[in-house]
Amino acid sequence: MRSVALFVVVAGLVAAPVGPIEAQTDLRITEYVIPTPNSRPHSIAAAPDGRIYFSELATNKIGVFDPQAGRFAEATVPTARSQPHGVAVEPRSGLVYVTQLAGGKIIQFRAPSEVREFEIPTPNSAPHTAWPDRDGNIFFTEARTGKIGRLNPQTGQVSEWQLPARAGVPYGIEVDRQGMAWVAQLNASRIARLDPSSGQVQEFVPRTPNSGTRRLSIDSRGRVWITYNRAHKIGLFDPATAAFTEMDTVSPGSEPYAIVVDRDDYVWYSEFTTDQIVRYDPRTNQSITFKTPVPKAEVRFLTVAPDGSIWYANFGNSRIGRIGR
């Protein structure tokens, strides 16, 4: 564990909204240009105060956007060429955590004035996606080692659990209300559930082979929604019955990537090849699509803000976007 200063390199820049587009609803999509060009924003998370945090993979920065003021701030990660990747906000403390894909560390900071870095025990682990649990710990996936990690910020201790498929590429992760960590394994095409109290891991395999289970999100009933990136489907796993339900995405060959369930249990997912973000209503089986204002958005992560709006990172065009009223 190392504590260092975080220096703000860009602050007070006014974001320029880009072309709101009306969809088949009263929701609209708006994008904001990040100050640093070619920053490659990868992951994004909303804080309880409404601020939006995102990682800038190509420029070694962490970005902050204040929607109320319409202003960005950016900070350089202390470890050079660390490839900041996954972003999570611990809701009670408001602390922000960012994985370093190349740096092998987890960053904790109170943006933008203070940062700590925590070393991961396993070298070359490629810490990927992060998610907080109910006790303030941060779970994360290790893409190169086939492990799930957990950081205890109070002690600095990092615990690790090996998944059965060592080359399975654990990708998306989320922790449910019971404290179980759910993980999508991209290459293994399955999901896993870790009970951190016992260390027990259970794996569940979808009906569709080579589905490319990439990211997942948990609804209010504890059901797990999953993107099948290679099979162009959305999956639903119900832990109560251990059964999968699968459905095609709106567009053929869409390569669904990011997914999030909002507070009303609408399921949102991004179609990587079509520049669309889709809102799916499981109750009616109806979908609404939102086209990003510019092509090649390559949306890799979605988050829900306190006001219910959906935010995304536009990886391809160095922007962040909002869908809401």
Image (tube, grey):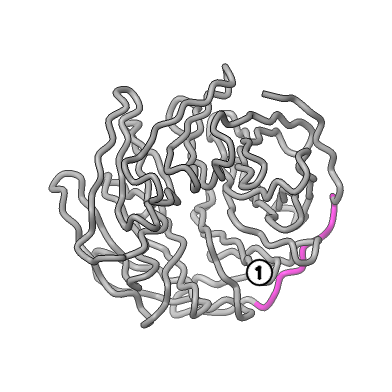
Q: Residue furthest top?
A: 155
Tell me which amino acid carries mark 1: Glu
Q: Quadrant of residue 247?
A: bottom left
Magenta part, dominant SS: strand
Observer-nearest of 74 and 124: 124
Q: Is residue 261 visible?
A: no
State the residue at coordinates (32%, 58%).
189
Label 1 sits on residue: 31
Q: Position of residue 135 (x, y in %)?
A: 45, 25
Q: Position of residue 143 (x, y in %)?
A: 49, 48
Q: Is residue 186 above or below residue 232?
A: above
State the residue at coordinates (31%, 41%).
164
Q: Is residue 146 above or below residue 152?
A: below
In terms of secondary structure, where does tag 1 sit? Answer: strand
Q: Is residue 143 visible?
A: yes
Which image quarter is the N terminus in?
top right
Indicate left or right for 95 with 190 as reference: right
State the residue at coordinates (72%, 48%).
62
State the residue at coordinates (77%, 63%).
15
Write the start and end of the magenta stretch as one range.
Answer: 11-19
Which image quarter is the C terminus in?
bottom right
Q: Position of residue 4 (x, y in %)?
A: 79, 28
Q: Is residue 70 above or below residue 99?
A: below
Q: Position of residue 227 (x, y in %)?
A: 37, 62
Observer-nearest of 59 and 248: 59
